[in-house]
Image (cartoon, rainbow, N blue to C red):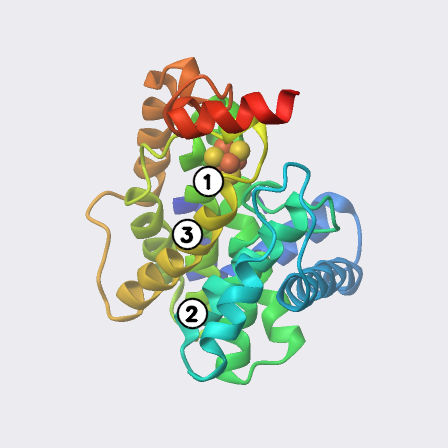
Amino acid sequence: MEYNSIQELLELALAEETTIAEIVLKVEAEESELSEADVKARMLENLKVMQKSIKAGREKKIESAGGLVGEEAAKMSDYIAGRPGLLYLQAVTDALAVAEVNAGMGKIVAGPTAGSSGIVPAVVVATGEQLGKSDEEMMMSLFTASGLGYVVSRKATLAGAAGGCQAECGVGSAMAAGAAVELHGGTPEMVVHAFALALKNLLGLVCDPVAGLVEVPCVKRNGFSASHGLTAAAMALAGIKSVIPPDEVVLAMTEIGDALPASLKETSKGGLAVTPTGEKIACRLRK
Ligand code: SF4
């Protein structure tokens, strides 16, 4: 069994009358020559790292390399403390938390990349907690996210240096959207449409980190991308479909990434990085 496109992944799930997560798990077990139980145990380890990074970012100020970020998650935690039940805000907080841990060189799961590592954990854990899901169920939804990301890694890119931030936070948001649909018990079609809806709306997002550090705009962009993924999941669960099929959205991402100038692909020579404030920060940090 194998899949090289999101359409093929969907068709496998439909043919087997199962979930996308189960298909991704089966393929991973076959390819790695491990038992499904071993593959699941490895994914559970990833979930544990994600949960720990969320906790670490929520609870304490992070010392980042450039000192440009580090207390966003703590501020959001304080803000939402009196506003329980707001799934979006919990996911935003947790995405900030993990992205800050990454900026502070802490341990994260780089899915799809380190710079966009806050989005999938935040959406999966916040949705899972809200729905009362077990760790096993949250872990299975990570297979959904990873199957979708795997296709992008084969057909396009997951690197900001090659495709801009659409390939990092855009894909992270789309992977998270698919995982959230699966946690809600949505159909495989809903999963792939959530993916397409989220990615479509982040096409063209440039990579322009201030001073070359994965701090500004990266950390806050993780927070926004988490809420974006939840919106896409809600639309798909409501029955809204992407007119452009998921694989064609990935193709469009590649074309847009190729068309972006090098200044907007992680070189810090364009966009926010060369604003007066961005330049000033870069100059200060060089000294
Ligand atoms: S702006 Fe660039 S470095 Fe920052 S998260 Fe996006 S792709 Fe990664």
Instruction: Name the residue carrying label 1.
Output: 217
Based on the displayed image, in which of its 4 quarters is residue 213 positioned? Answer: top right
Q: In this view, does 213 lie to the left or right of 236?
A: right
Left or right: where 67 falls relative to 19: right
Q: State the image coordinates of residue 65 (x, y, percent, origin top left).
A: 68, 38
Seen from the viewer's position, the closer of residues 152 and 283 is 283
Percent x, y of residue 136 = 66, 74
Q: Earlier in the sequence, mark 2 or mark 1?
A: 2
Using the numbered discs, state the Cα–Cα distance from disc 3 to disc 2 in whole angstroms.
12 Å
- Choose mark 1 or mark 3, whichever is in front: 1
In the rendered image, which residue does mark 3 sit on?
Answer: 225
Q: Where is residue 144 in the image (x, y as percent from the top left)?
A: 53, 58
Distance between the alpha carbons at the discs numbered 2 and 1: 19 Å
Q: In the image, is residue 215 above or below residue 129?
A: above
**Which residue is depicted at the point 63% across and 42% down?**
67
Q: Do the residues labelled 1 and 3 touch (CB within 8 Å)?
A: no
**What amino acid is at disc 2?**
Leu
Identify the residue at image location x=72%, y=53%.
29
Q: Which of 188 and 58 is in front in this view?
A: 58
Residue to which mark 2 is pinned? 89
Q: Is residue 153 above or below residue 142?
A: above
Say which amino acid is labelled 3.
Ser
User: 46 or 19: nearer the eye?
Assistant: 46
Q: Which SS class for mark 3? A: helix
Q: Neighbour class for label 3 at 10 Å: few (<14), some, many (≥20)?
A: many
Check disc 1 and give the amino acid type: Pro
Q: Distance between the residues labelled 1 and 3?
A: 12 Å
